[in-house]
Amino acid sequence: LVDTTHDDHYVLDRSQILGGQVLAVRSFKQLNLIIDNIRNALVDTFNSSDLSSLHLSCDSDTLKQSAIQANNRLRDDAAIPSLVCDLLRHLGMDPQHVLWEWPSFRIFLPSSLSNVGTYRNGTTTLLKPHRDTWYGSPQHQINFWGPVVDLPENQTLRVFPQYHLKSVDNTSAGRDSWAHNIGLSLNPSARQNVDMSNPVAPPLSVGDCIAFAGHSL
């Protein structure tokens, strides 16, 4: 893990991240502008600014439907391309040379209630160890993952750097995106036990993020 604070002269070292580095970027102003838009979509849709307690005021079906509405609002947000391009420039990259995915969010219910959450326009479970490349993501993908509410250590996404250069037997060869989208196939998963000790999972405040390779576990 490399921990750094963003400033106006910051340049992202993509080769280090693709080589296995997990980067925590703190106080990233341009990221915070995107987070503001995500939070506004959630707050306005749920009519609540206390996003950590939504499960206390609505059932899981209502939460899912409201989350879909918030995601649709975010998807139609005309400000997103400009905000993302500005973020890329402040990482030292030319937006014309970057293919990026539209930002989104995940919501999970507390484990005492359910392991089911929402992502984009569907449901999601707490994901088991995986690589995004198992889902068809390109080998050179870099993920930026950050919270819309402050997250303490080890209550966030975990990266297992000890597997970065190790093969992990998995079921991705049988993945079919079309079949998956209509509910006829499962998410790819590991076929072997994964040692989940010593993860990289730093505490993250709103405006912080971690950057890691799409082929990280």
Image (cartoon, grey):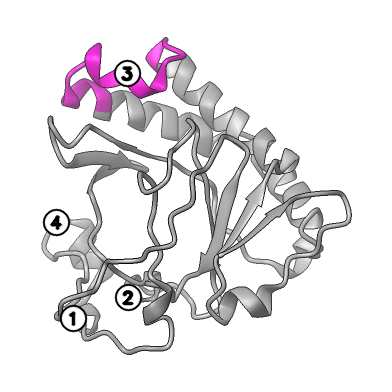
Q: Earlier in the sequence, mark 1 or mark 3?
A: 3
Q: Nearer the viewer, residue 143 or 73?
A: 143
What residue did someone put label 1 on?
174
Between disc 1 and disc 2, the foreground one is 2
Q: Nearer the viewer, mark 2 or mark 4?
A: 2
Residue at the image point whose x is 73% and y is 66% from the top: 12
Q: Is residue 42 left or right of residue 28?
A: left
Quadrant in which the N terminus is drawn: bottom right
- Which mark, by number, is residue 130? none
Residue designated by label 3: 53
Q: Which circle, 3 or 4, is nearer the viewer?
A: 3
Mark 3 residue element: helix
**Mark 4 is on which residue type?**
Gly
Question: Residue 157, position in %: x, y?
Answer: 39, 53
Name the mark nearer the viewer: 1 or 3: 3
| Disc number for residue 134 | 2
> Disc 3 to disc 4, how far (Cα)?
30 Å
- Which quarter of the picture shows residue 69? top left
- Spatial CA span between label 4 and label 1: 14 Å
Residue 197 lies, in percent from the top left, at: 29, 66
Q: Distance between the residues labelled 1 and 3?
A: 38 Å
Query: Which circle's residue, 2 or 3, is located before the other in the chain?
Result: 3
Q: Nearer the viewer, residue 175 or 160?
A: 160
